[in-house]
Image: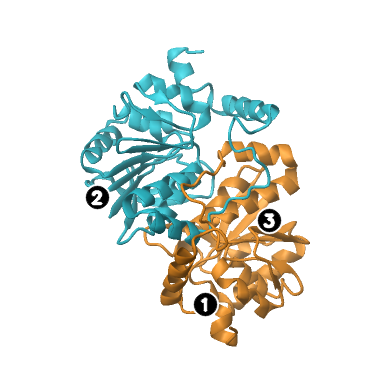
Chain colours: A cyan, B orange
Amino acid sequence: MDVAILIYEGFTALDVTGPFEVLSRLPDARVRFVSATPGMVAADQPGFGLVAEPLESMERPGVVVVSGGSTTTRFLDDEAVLSWLRRTHETSVWTTSVCTGSLLLGAAGLLQGRAATTFWYELDSLRCFGAEPVSRRVVEDGKIITAAGVSSGIDMALVVCDRLQGPAYAQAVQLGIEYDPQPPHDAGSVDKAPAEVVRFMRDNLERAYGPSWARRNYHTS
Amino acid sequence: MDVAILIYEGFTALDVTGPFEVLSRLPDARVRFVSATPGMVAADQPGFGLVAEPLESMERPGVVVVSGGSTTTRFLDDEAVLSWLRRTHETSVWTTSVCTGSLLLGAAGLLQGRAATTFWYELDSLRCFGAEPVSRRVVEDGKIITAAGVSSGIDMALVVCDRLQGPAYAQAVQLGIEYDPQPPHDAGSVDKAPAEVVRFMRDNLERAYGPSWARRNYHTS
């Protein structure tokens, strides 16, 4: 099973490493990072880079994973990326994304009329691509599976394992990465975090990146 | 705050990326991978490598994170690694490990008389270093924090955030990586996974790596 993980300058390290770790454990998996700018690709936090192969090196992956990142919206008109997504989606078994990666699936036209999710801060942006935004950790619609922010790629990849190899296999992979989460707080979603923490993060993100893509481009509320 | 993440050929990708992603979000964080074999260091699954700086480039990190991996036990007598761990531990604020990384802390003599954890398959090996093995996701003893397998580095790093910056900051980071885990199954620990799944994984690990380090070296049960 070939798995292609699409990255670009400014991808988020954990977005791709969760799916990499899980999907590498599929039988006969060949998991590779691919990019329109192959070679060393820098993540959005300094000190982390991954080597990617050219997009053309993976034309018929069984699983496609699209990374999110701080820079995703800069690539929403990158025709090399979008046409590769359309091509690989024709033959993929599962086409997936983590975090803002779903905006790239949207820009490629693959989310028209579909339920999808993304990083909470960009959830409204999915509407601009004809998708129905759903505030859920993992959203499966047909053969497209989108995941919420950053760490949710782990859960999404375990769902892919489950669909491809059945529940016992997915459970074995989960035990192999000892994914029995017990964070010190229960603040991992906008519904669960204290209101002032959500406000703090929203302000931080707005200062760093501006309003969400939808609000910047469509002046939605 | 300087954070040094120790890696070596055969480290596990997700062991280090969880802490990297979380600790990069500390104020003024400088997170770097370091290795006794600097340059490109290959993970234990093909297709993933990270560039590491020499150990000497980080002599007084505030936080030390030791990665686990499929090859950890090969480095238990690597004096360059062990002496760097002893030196940095003298001045660190927190000395931490993920997965089998705690065996390296043990080999460096830092776990004598301390409670610690590691990947479930190697839990008994901690006793060989005078540590008290605890089957828990994150174990804090003095300024040493050890984490269980692979994905538990995320939880451990959030604990470090909490200790350094307080609960609201840790919650903000958790929301930033949207860590609100909802895996498709509840099988992430030996206590929760079905017995046949635990047996399957135990057999798999034994075939791949042999018995645990303790059983190989001390003929414990």
Q: Is residue A77 left or right of residue A44?
A: left
Give me the disc on residue B154. Answer: none
x, y percent for residue B176: 58, 37
Which numbered disc, 1 or 3, marks the residue that appears first in the sequence?
3
The residue positioned farthest toward the front in the image shown: B195
Q: Residue at x 56, y 61 (%)?
A: B149
Q: Chain of mark 2?
A: A
Q: Chain of mark 3?
A: B
Rendered-image quadrant of the C terminus of chain B: bottom right
Give me the disc on residue A57. Answer: 2
x, y percent for residue A215: 48, 17
Q: Circle 3 sits on which residue?
A: B63
* Mark 2 residue element: helix
Q: Residues within 10 Å of mark 2 (few under 14, many from 20)?
A: few
Where is B141 relative to A188, above or below?
below
Q: Is residue B208 left or right of residue B98?
A: left
